Amino acid sequence: MASLKIVVWDNIGNTLLGMRAWDQWDKATQERLLTEDPEARSRVVSFDDLFSDQEIELVWLYDPVKSQRGFRAFFEENRQFLRPVTDVQDLVDALANAEFMVRTRSAFPPKR
């Protein structure tokens, strides 16, 4: 089976953090989410949930300067997916053969 390539442009990890499976969230976060929304468990959907019948190749693009502002532990947990983007060609290369791109409001790198 061919893998489904998902490229995420996310400097601090909010997108990937939000796409964690329910059991990957710590108990305190689960409790807070359930307090805010008793149906939270059913609303947490990960890439693995969305594409359960596919093997996923995840590529997490980030700006190596802007990304240093937070979520260092989360970066370490997901190091195998990380690809730094320092110019437009890095972005073009990462998007080759991708089926999906997920992006946040972060600006893409300037053309140099």
Image: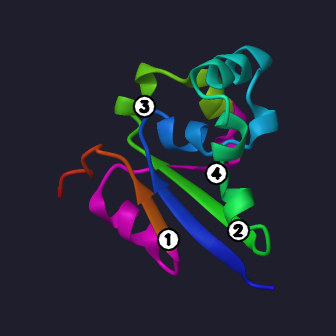
Residues at marks 4 and 1, CA–CA distance in whole angstroms: 15 Å
Mark 4, residue position: 81
Magenta stretch in the rendered image:
77-99
Judged by depth in the image, the label closer to the viewer, 1 or 2, is 2
Judged by depth in the image, the label closer to the viewer, 4 or 2, is 2
> What residue is drawn where x is 57% and y is 22%?
36
Q: Residues within 10 Å of mark 1 (few under 14, many from 20)?
A: few
Disc on res. 58 = none
Residue 64 left/right relative to 51: left
| Residue 102 percent across, percent down from the top left | 45, 58
Mark 3, residue position: 67
Disc on res. 51 = 2
- Toward the viewer: 33 or 106? 33
Q: Amino acid at mark 1?
A: Phe
The tag earlier along the polypeptide, 1 or 3, is 3
Q: Amino acid at mark 2?
A: Phe
Residues at marks 3 and 4, CA–CA distance in whole angstroms: 14 Å
Residues at marks 4 and 2, CA–CA distance in whole angstroms: 17 Å
> Does the magenta run of residues contain 32?
no
Disc on res. 100 = 1
> Does the magenta run of residues contain 98?
yes
Discs 4, 1 touching: Cβ within 8 Å? no
The tag earlier along the polypeptide, 1 or 2, is 2
> In what element is the residue under mark 3?
helix
> In what element is the residue under mark 1?
strand
**Residue 1 figure quarter:** bottom right
